[in-house]
Amino acid sequence: MNDLAPLLTPEGRALLEEVRGTAPADELAVATRLRRDHPADLVSAALGQARLRQRAAAKFAAADAERMFFTPNGVEQSTRASVAAYRARRLTDLGVTSVADLCCGIGGDAIALARAGIRVLAVDRDPLTAAVARANAQALGLTDLMEVREADVTEVDTAGYDAVFVDPARRGGRGRVFDPEAYSPPLSWAVEAARRAPHAALKIAPGVPHEAVPPEAEAEWISDGGDVKEAVLWFGTGAPGAVRATLLPGPRTLLGRGLPDPDVRPVGRYLYEPDGAVIRAHLVAEVAEEVGGGLVDATIAYVTADGLHPTPYATPYEITDQLPFNLKKLKALLREREAGTLTVKKRGSAVEPEELRRKVKPQGPNAATVFLTRVAGAPTMLVGGPARPPEGP
């Protein structure tokens, strides 16, 4: 879809309504029928938009996705609505009432900000993307709070806004960009824009090196449903240098306390797998302290402990067996346990889970979890399953 305008006409909107929910297997028949009465390009655009709306339902509420407009890149790169809403709440808690959203894309973050009652200037330099953001503001009834402007973000005056939000493009012609200075605009430009504002939030890739975080910024890693979604550099929160991991839904936030690395200890009865946001934020030590545990290896983010201490920041497993890496021994153990449903997790191992399943050929009515990892430097297999709290009297 290179031109949004035809879809915004009465004929285009009627077609969008007609093709809503079209299954991929039915597209050809639907297109053939509709092209008898409508231009072929318009039919193709409507069907393409219907596909994008179906994909977008994974990030946006279904009721919103059915009314919004998307581009392929917009669906791919837009923030999940739950994450955007969480960020908007943080800004309102800071007293922010107006935000300049730079690199707004299709408007997902601006929508969350507007729904939080914040006045938003949403800026994107791509004409189609800006047009889509404008159409989304109209579709969701947010035009009173969302102004969309097609412009180069580096030329926008943000002096009249309480905060700036910057979501630099992190994809280039060859795919994902990992160097923060290769973002568009570069992270250094975004940091300078943040320093000029009373408050700011910069969305960056969760793999950003910690040494790239400016000393006056608060760094937050966010996961949603166990999947790490982003890192945010916050300015003007009153907590320079703070580090936090936030887990959605909730939210539940773990604050860094500058703890030293945990000790390495023998594998105990329980193994804790920290949430990805906790690992990215380098807060495994905080989890280890919370559960009274240590590391199985100095370089591996698995925490072991003798006791079961439920925590929202890590998933506990009960370990029944510890084996040196040996597929024959593992196969024999799983056969003895009649484990046909096998969950394979790995950290610090080159073996792929599917390769292991194929070689051990699990069979039987029971389930097991196998961790491929290192224990005190040695390749090791830990076998067990999700920990269950002890039954009451």
Image: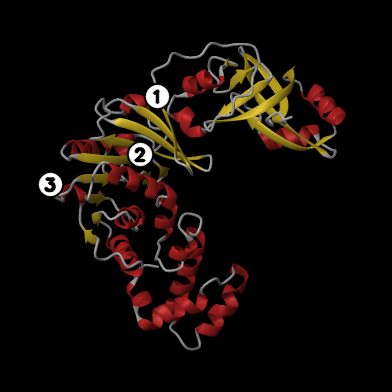
Q: Residue at x 31, y 28 (%)?
A: 212
On the image, the x and y values in percent for residue 305 come to: 62, 18
Residue 378 occupies quadrant: top right
Q: Tell me the amino acid under the disc marked 3.
A: Ala
Judged from this view, the residue extending furthest toward the front is 393
Mark 1 and mark 3 in contact? Answer it, CB < 8 Å.
Answer: no
How many C-alpha atoms fall within 10 Å of the one at disc 3: few (<14), some, or many (≥20)?
A: few
How many C-alpha atoms fall within 10 Å of the one at disc 2: few (<14), some, or many (≥20)?
A: many
Q: How is the image coloured?
A: secondary structure
Q: Tell me the amino acid under the disc marked 2.
A: Ile
Can residue 173 be seen? no
What secondary structure is marked by label 1?
Answer: loop
Q: Residue at x 34, y 46 (%)?
A: 89
Residue 254 occupies quadrant: top left
Q: Earlier in the sequence, mark 1 or mark 2?
A: 2
1 vs 2, front mark: 1
Q: Is residue 392 left or right of residue 186?
A: right
